[in-house]
Structures are given as C-alpha cells and as structure tokens.
Image (spheres, rainbow, N blue to C red):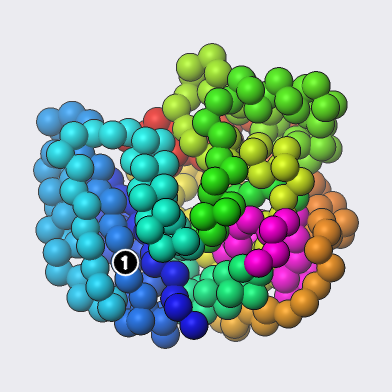
Amino acid sequence: MIYAPIALFVYNRLQHTRQTVEALVKNDLAAESELFVFSDGPRSEGDRESVEAVRMYLASINDFKLITVVERETNFGCAASIIGGITEIVNRYGQIIIVEDDIVTSPYFLRYMNEALEFYRDEERVVCIHGYLYPVKKKLPDTFFLKGADIWGWATWKRGWDLYENDSQKLLDELTERNLIREFDVDDSFCYSGILKHQIWGDINTWDIQWLAAAFLKGKLTLYPGKSLVRNIGYDSSGTHCDTSNSFDTEVSPDPVRIQRIPLKEHAGARKAVRNFFRSLDPEPESSLVQHTLDRLARILGRR
C-alpha cells in the first residue's frame, strides 16, 4: 500500500500544534508517512513571535518518513493557505490526509484513513473519509455514509478535490433552484446554507462550507467511523471567533475501525442521530448558525 501524505495546517498556537503532532506520532504508520506542514505567515507583528515559536517546534520533529515545512513569508489567510496546500499535495500524490492544528487523533487514525482511501479508491460516489464523529446518543455501525463532505480530520483523492467549487453564490443558487436547502441544513437542524450566505456577504472568509456544499450537490458520500478517532481541542477561546465550549467534545475511541463493504448510500439512522444532536445544541437553528459559525468552524472562518 502507498500511504497517503499528511497535510498539517498551523498558525500560532504552539500548545495545540504540539498536541496534534504528538498524537500523530503515536500512530503506527507515522514513520511510513510523509508530513507536509503549511505554516501561514503572521497576520500582524503581534503574531510574529507566536508564529516563530510554532516554527521552531516544527524544526524539532523527526518522527515521520519525510517532513517538509512550508513557511509562508506573508499571511495567506486560512482559506487560501488550506486551499493552496491541499491542491498542491493532492495534485502531486493523488490522495491526501488533512489535519489542522487543533485536531488530536487516535493512534489508529492513519491506518483507518489509509485503509479507507485504498478500499474506496475507485468508488466515484465516495469523495471523503472522515475521522470525527459527533457525540451522538445512538450507537452506530463501525462505518457508515452521510451525504456531502466534512473537515475535522479527513482525507480525499484528487477526483474528490477536483469537485471543489469556491463560488459560494453559485452553490447557494443551485441549492435553492433544486429545492435542497432543507436537506443541506440537515432537516433545518443546522443552518449550513446560512454560513454560505455569510460567506457571500463577506462576514466570514472560509473554504470549508464550499467543500461541503459542492460534494452535497454532486450527491457524493463521506465515510464516517462509528466511534470518533478525532477530538477537537480548539474550543478554548484560543482562536479568533472561538468561544469556550464542550458541545462537540467527544472521547477518542481506543479501538481500531474495521473497513468493510457497506451499502453505498446515506445511513438513515446516522443522519437522524446527527440531526438530533444538532437540534440539542440550540432550539433555534438560525441562532445555532450564528454561534457555531463562530464556534464549530472557528479555525477556518478568518481567524488567521
């Protein structure tokens, strides 16, 4: 098996970056994987010292097959940095595993990602492998599919990333014309379409909502684990727009995830479980949008 390269996106949070890297190192495939780290340049002089501290730490890492650190001389901003980094690596290698500087992974994360990338390599409908599972109340299968894409510890192939569409207005128009807004918003439980609107209005500057919408409109699927292999540690007010919260906190599974043949369709029970989780966050979906536009997607909504 040819193991997928890992792309890690960092900015100025040393302790988060350290936890992310240390968790990846504990994976049994770390020593056989190439790691590309994209370090964005400081947004202001006030950020320069913390950016340099992260870069000094990155220079000390030696636990992967090969490590390449791309130090941006200027501040690209999170969206441009991530889009550019993913595009560069996936065009070169044909596949990619993506983590950001607030994602702590299970020791089985890389194995799950690589096995799933290999298993579904030629399955055109599957475009994303995801490592995080919401803290839902329902017990779910070892793996299952949901429609669209996701972005907390994930992987894709070139054929998947080629679907990326950066034009938020175009995506919103198609969702509206095809009467898909309610479904895209997970039965009105989380206002993803509202995030698209905020992107169009210039309130935020992100890349991920376009990825979710583009995959959704193409009828593509994301593979999820029945138990989370990822924990997000970014809900500590360390990022701009990021309030302290434990709503999305979850335990990382101590067990590996078995990849096996399952029906190529959205799992109705999993969709219902996610919908119920979203509804438990806030009784008003639009209010939930405002909070979680600044919370769940904090690290990619113009923080940098």
Task: Decide if residue 137 is in sight here.
Answer: no
Residue depicted at x 72% and y 50%: 220
Label 1 crowd (10 A; few <14 / some 14-19 / many >=20): many
Q: Amino acid at mark 1?
A: Leu
Give the magenta-colored segment's residue range: 122-146
Residue depicted at x 52% and y 79%: 111
Q: Under tag 1, what secondary structure?
A: strand
The answer to if 130 sits in the magenta stretch is yes
Q: Is residue 170 left or right of residue 75?
A: right
Q: Is residue 62 left or right of residue 238?
A: left
| In the rendered image, the vertical position of residue 96 relative to residue 282, given as above or below | below
Task: Decide if residue 128 is in sight here.
Answer: yes
Image location (x, y in percent) of residue 143: 72, 71
| In the rendered image, the vertical position of residue 170 relative to residue 110, given as above or below | above
| In the rendered image, the vertical position of residue 96 relative to residue 183, given as above or below | below
Q: Depth check: give the residue in front, 258 or 284.
A: 258
Image location (x, y in percent) of residue 276: 80, 48
Magenta span: predominant SS is: loop
- Which residue in the protein does label 1 denote? 35
Residue depicted at x 36% and y 42%: 84
The quadrant in which residue 262 appears is bottom right
| In the rendered image, the vertical position of residue 302 relative to residue 129, given as above or below | above
